[in-house]
Amino acid sequence: MISKLRVEPGSAPQLARRDPAGRLDIPGKEEGKALLQPLVAELGVLQNRLAAEAARSVLLILQGLDASGKDGTIRNVLTGINPQCCRVVAFKEPTSTDLAHDYLWRVHAACPARGEIAIFNRSHYEDVVAVRAHRLQPAKVWRRRPQHICAFERLLSDEGTTIVKVFLHVSQNEQRRRLQERLDDPEKGWKLRQSDLDDHARYDELMAIYEDTIGATSTKWAPWHIVPADHNWVRNVAVARLLVDALRRLDPTLPPRPPGIADAKLA
Ligand code: AMP
Ligand code: MG
């Protein structure tokens, strides 16, 4: 499954050719739930080892259009993780302090410490995608950013951070259905902003920007994965598998018990 989701470095993601409603061979919702459970449990065990080892870290970057399911992924996939060794960072419009620095300043500060898993709900990719879509900076500024980002992620990777990048690929129809649901539901309406509705109308344009940006930033050290996101239960299993796979490959080792503890007996 994972190799099918991966964008090979140097190649285009070909978003238009990938089906947002793809099921990844999962027959239905119930089967999806059943597949997710053991993955969530394994994530908990592996995370405990990663924290105990305290040498390396994992960074999950979630990107996607509004209502593509970034919040839902975090809620459903990370339930087995100890909040003490994990940080979730949601990147919003930069503050005036953020803007007084280079665009990676706030991002670097939010990266995981050794032993931690960090989840970015949006990320430095907004500094290309949102900036380009909303014409916040001239082209010469956002055009050079993919190169900075590849170098920045290389630094993180060299220094012990495993980076898992996920684009939640939702169709325009499913996005419309979810935005309508938010409009209709008093519990969800607060999530909406006029810009979400405007961006929905510009779906094709945003996808073209993602096509470019993902193609320019899928690297050996930080490859992108395109996760079909029209079905929540497919998306959850796919992201959980990507995380479990990354942690299995790290294979964090528990430190030995301190001397004297191995054969100690309690009074
Ligand atoms: P949400 O994730 O729906 O709460 O919205 C956050 C908003 O902040 C989105 O519209 C993002 O595009 C925007 N945003 C996040 N980071 C940046 C950035 N670096 N530059 C411009 N807009 C951003
Ligand atoms: Mg929004």
Image: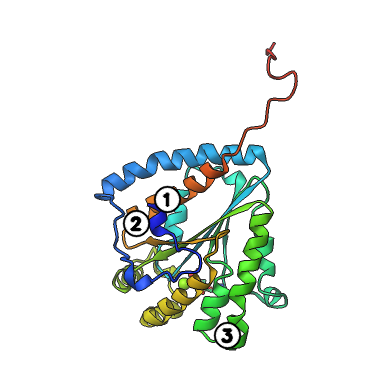
- Depth check, front residue: 250 or 259: 250
For marks 2 and 3 on the same chain, the one whose residue lies earlier in the sequence: 3
Q: How far apart are labels 3 and 1 at the CA level?
A: 33 Å
* Label 2 C-beta lies within 8 Å of the nearest ligand 1 atom: no
Q: Give the numbered dot on residue 146.
A: none
Residue 183 in view of the camera: no
Image marks 2 and 1: residues in contact by CB distance under 8 Å: yes
Residue 106 in view of the camera: yes
Mark 2: amino acid: Asn
* Label 3 C-beta lies within 8 Å of the nearest ligand 1 atom: yes
Mark 3: amino acid: Leu
Mark 1: amino acid: Asn
Q: For the residue labelled by badge 1, is the local secondary structure a helix, a strand or a loop?
A: helix
Q: Is residue 1 left or right of residue 51?
A: left
Q: Residue furthest front?
A: 10
Residue occupying image coordinates x 68% and y 51% = 113
* Label 1 C-beta lies within 8 Å of the nearest ligand 1 atom: no
Q: Which residue is mark 1?
A: 76
Q: Which residue is mark 2?
A: 232
Location of residue 222 (image quadrant)? bottom right
Residue occupying image coordinates x 62% and y 84% = 141
Q: Give the numbered dot on residue 136.
A: 3
Q: Is residue 119 left or right of residue 5?
A: right
